[in-house]
Amino acid sequence: MGILQYPSPATPTKPRPQNRRSQGFYTKDAGTVYRKNMSLLRKLICQETTTFKNVWTIQSSSPISYHSGKIYLDNYRRCVSCITPEPRTIYQMPGWPTSEKIEDALLLECPVGEVLPKPSDYKPSWAAVTAHNWLFRLSANSGEILEKVYLASHCKFRYLSWDIPQEVMAIKSTQLKLPATARQIGIQQSVLYFLAIFRVWPLSFVGMLELDKKIFGNSMADVSVSHEMLIVTHNTGHVRLYSFQAISERFMEHPVDLGQEYSWNGKVGIVGKYPFGIPCNIKITDTPDLLFEVSSLESAFQIGGYPWHYIITPNKKSQEGIFHVCSLKDHTLAKNGIQDMKCCSLEPDRISFHPDNSGRILHVGPNLIKVLKLKETESAKQQEVTEDFIIEANRENNVNNSVTVTASGRIVKKRFKLLDDDPEQETFKIVDYEDELNLLSVVAVTQIGVDGAAHLDFHCNKQGIRLKSFPFVESWDVTYNHEVHFDRHTVLHIQQKPHRMFSCHIYQMTCNSGKDDNIQKGKRRGCVWSKTGGRY
C-alpha cells in the first residue's frame, strides 16, 4: 500500500488515495468494480440505441422455472442456459417416475467468508423435496446428487420455504387427512401439518414439530416459518405469531443430528436414512407465548417499513380492497394510513412493501402504481403515509363516456361502465424490481382484436420516470398465467398455453448498429426449440 502521505496544513489539497485506503476505501475492490459495472450496464440499457430482441423460444409440456441465468424444465431434471445465442443444455438428469418427481426446490448459494466442510459447498446447489419424501441437495451445474436425507413415511412433505434466507429452510407437509372410513365413524384429525427445519451450510437437522388443533385452536388453517417466527393463520382471519426459538428451547425433547442412531415412536434407526427418516423431536404440549396477533380479511398480513409497520385489510367482506398501514409497536393506524384506490376491476389491486428494503410501499392497481413512503409527523409519535411518486397507464380520457350521440342526433346512454382492467385499455399486469440495476420493471397489456399486446417498461426506482420501453413480439393471452423475469441484460417471458403447454421467450440486450440486418434478425427470432433441444 505504500507510505501514507499527509499534506502540509498550509497547503489545502484534495483527499489522496493513500488516506482513503487507510479508512478502508479501495478503488479496485470487488464491490466497487461491480457497482461501477452495474451503473454502466444501466446506462447502456436505457440509452436510445439499445433494445431487447427475442433471440429464441423454448417449449415444454411441464412448467418452466428460471433462476440466476438458467432455465429449468421437466421438474428441474433439465437445465438450459439462457445467456447464449441458442439454447445450450447444461445438464440432463435421467428420467424419474412420477412417484419420484421433484415437488419443490430452493436455490442454495454459499455464504461469503465462511469455511465449509466440502469443496462442493462453495458452488450453487438446489435443495429439492421429492414426491417420495426425500430431500436432495443437487449441484446447480451438473444435477449430481450431493446429499440426500429421507424425511418420513407417516406424512407427505411437499413445500420448501426460507425461514432465514440462505441459512435456515422449512419443509412443510401437505394437510393430514384421515381415511374416509375413519371420518364416517366420527374420528377427527387434530394434527394438521408437520414442519421440519434444516440449516443449509452445512446441511443439518434442527427439528421437526407437529401442528395440532388442540394446541393452536380448532380454527387453525395454515402454518409457516419466517425470520424465526412461527406464523399460524386461522380460517377466522386471525394471524398469530410465535417465537420459533422459544418454542424450540421449551419443547425440544432431544437435539438430533443427521446420521445419528435414535429411538422414536417405538423404532430405532439412523436419522435421515431410509426407512427411519427424521424424528418429531419438538413436541408442543402447551400453547406457546403469543408475540403478536392481528385480524385480517383472508389472513393477508405483511410486515415491513421503518420503523416497523404492518399492512392488513379489515376483516370484513365490505372492506375488500381497502388497506390499513399500522404500527407494529402499538397497532396505531398511520396518518393517511387507509389506502383505497376505489378501482372497479375483475382482479383486485395489490399492496406490498417495496422489495428494495427502502421501507416504501408498492400499491399496484390496474391503471395506477403508487410508491408510498413512511414519514415522521411533527409529533414524532406517529408515522404518515405520503406519496413518493406515481406511474399511470397510457389511456384515452373518453373511454368511459356513458352518453353518446348518434348520427341522427339521438342520445344513447350506456347501461354499463367499463371496468378499470377492461382488456381494451392498457392495464398493468406485472410489477417487479431489478435490484442490481435499481430499476422497476412494469408489464402493461392491451387487448387488440383477438390477441393481447404487451410491452415492458423500465422506470427509475427513485423518481418513477420511464427510462425505457420495448414490446413483446408474442401475443399475451390474459386468460393464462404469465411470468416475466428481468435479470440484468436478459428478459424472459414464461407463459402457459392451451392444453398445458408452456413457452419461454428469451430477450437479450442489443445495441442497434443502424444497418439493415432484418434477414439475420428474422432467422433468429423464428428459432423455436422443443424441450428435447430440437429445432422445429
Image: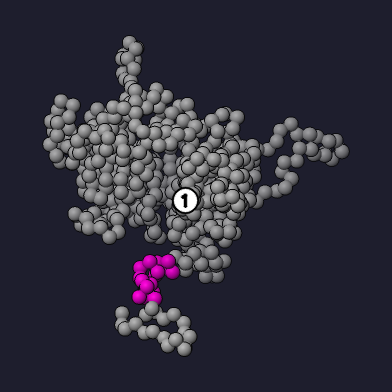
The image quadrant of residue 206 is top left
Residue that mark 1 sits on: 355
| Residue 181 pos. (x, y %) | 31, 14
Residue at 47% x, 88% y: name it.
11
Residue at 52% x, 62% y: name it.
51
Residue at 23% x, 32% y: name it.
280
Q: Amino acid at mark 1?
A: Pro
Please, which residue is most extreme toward the right here?
409
Residue 36 magenta: yes
Residue at 42% x, 66% y: name it.
35
In the rendered image, which quarter contains the N terminus? bottom left
The image quadrant of residue 273 is top left
| Residue 217 pos. (x, y %) | 39, 24
Give the residues in magenta: 20-37
Residue 234 magenta: no
What secondary structure is the magenta-colored segment mainly? helix
Mark 1 nearby-residue class (10 Å; few <14, some 14–19, many ≥20) = some
| Residue 429 pos. (x, y %) | 55, 45
220 with respect to 194 (left or right):
right
| Residue 426 pos. (x, y %) | 62, 47
Coloring applied to the structure: one colour
In the image, residue 428 sits, relative to residue 34, either above or below, namely above
